[in-house]
Amino acid sequence: MKKLLIFTMAIMLVAYGASFATLTKTLTMGNANNIVHDDGNIWLYPSTFYNYPDLAIGEFASDNFYDFGIHYKFGEESPVMLGVYFTTRQPFDLPDRPFSWNVLDDIGAATPASTGPNRIPNRRIDLFFGYMMGQNPVGLHLDYISCSRKQEFDSIPGAPDTPAQKIEESISNLGLDLGVTMMQGDADLAAGINLLSFTDKNSLGNDENKPSGNMGFYIMGRFFHSMNPKVTVVPHAKFSYDKTGYEHYGNAATPAIAGTMTEEYKFTDMVFDLGIGMNYSPAAGILAVGDIGFMMSNWKEEFTDWIVVVDSVQVTEEYKENTTALPYFRIGMDAAIFDWLDLRLGATSFWTSYVEEDNNINSTAPPTTYSWTEKWTNGYVNNSTYLGAGFHWGNFKADAYVNPAIFTRGLNFISGQSYTMNTQVSVLYEMF
């Protein structure tokens, strides 16, 4: 069950999110960032960054000010756009790369910000760049993640059992996203690549784990087609592929396998998402959205424990997960209540089929071999609902993911109870 929960969260991140996937306005409209025009689109389609100049944006959650970014505009006739974002959210867990949970758990252990496994202060900067190429806005997003630590100990004179030691650990990821907007702003296309690397050396300077083929890429697009003044349909599609892995080597504590690869892990994940959304505006100041689609994810994990001197046993395991949402739904609404207040409601529903298969081969002294297969099949529905509010005064805007208790319990002077009023808040200031 734990694997299922982790996997489900990772798939949601890959298929429907981006670096800051919890932007408040579109989230409270049913996680509709991909089917509406909004400044949050920049995390999905970098070319849309060109449409949102001179902004200052902050993200708040759990009583913390997590993220802050500024959009700079240089020039007037043919402006060049630059965006800089920093975050205090640590660590950044790379989706669909579970090896980082067990290989590099201790990389941040000596760091003051560490509070547990994988608490790695590693998120350095997000940069956006946009300009007009002919009649089409183009954009670039650079996401840089990196951290490292070293520990060096001199040998103690006269103590042959305490040789010099050197521990080295690091992890880095470079993400590059490119995008273009075409057809007078109706079509957006984006593609990206992630390159991951790490170092994990023990006290003798030998590799404990080495990366093996760690990269991922995706391509996605959408098209806004106006049917009439009230209805716009938004077909959209996405494909992503991740391939990651590492090799584990024996250590000096077991001389027979020191420096020998004893375990190998390979992970692949392929996600495909196809849907059609709708923007419906029955009256001024009201936008209702809907989305129906199909999502499929195939996850594969391969583990091999090579034959070693100490136990003369080889274990091979192939673990597969196939998750299909057929169909999924999103519905949402953004409606003006007062000149300064908007109401937002949203819901998502994923009708999910989940198949988990575990194939094992245990080889003792050949030709003796034991193999077995375990398989689980589940069908379930995952529904979520959202309540939001938008406040705007002049150039200042605030979007809130509202705690429903404000309606069910009332304010403190009515109920006498204390609770968090908003789960998260986004603030935006237009600098013009």
Image (cartoon, rainbow, N blue to C red):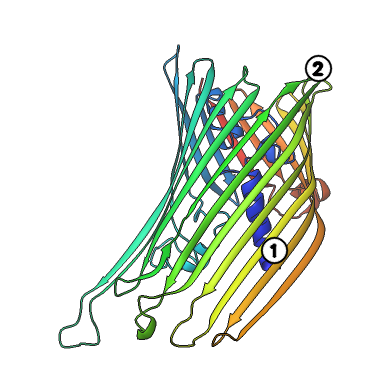
Residue 415 shown left or right of residue 22 in the figure: right
Q: Which residue is mark 1?
A: 4
Foreground residue, 160 or 236? 236
Query: Residue 11's x, y, as percent?
Result: 65, 52
- Above or below residue 238? Residue 62 is below
Foreground residue, 325 or 284? 325
Query: Residue 178's x, y, as percent?
Result: 50, 33
Residue occupying the point 64% across, 75% down: 360
Residue occupying the point 64% across, 29% down: 38
Q: Which quadrant: the N terminus?
A: bottom right
- Above or below residue 4? Residue 415 is above
SS label for mark 2: loop
Residue occupying the point 48% across, 49% down: 88
Q: Is residue 145 visible?
A: yes
Task: Rate crowding at label 1 as few (under 14), some (14 to 19) or many (20 or more) other CA atoms within 10 Å.
Answer: few
Foreground residue, 185 or 318? 318
**How many numbered circles are shown?**
2
- Above or below residue 193? Residue 51 is above
Query: What amino acid is labelled 1 in the image?
Result: Leu
Instruction: State which quadrant residue 391 falls in.
Output: top right
Residue farthest to the front, as pictured: 367
Instruction: State which quadrant residue 418 falls in.
Output: bottom right
Mark closer to the chain start, 2 or 1: 1
Query: What amino acid is labelled 2 in the image?
Result: Asn
Query: Residue 99's x, y, as percent?
Result: 52, 64
SS label for mark 1: helix
Foreground residue, 171 or 401? 171
Label of residue 228 in the image: 2
Residue occupying the point 54% across, 31% down: 179
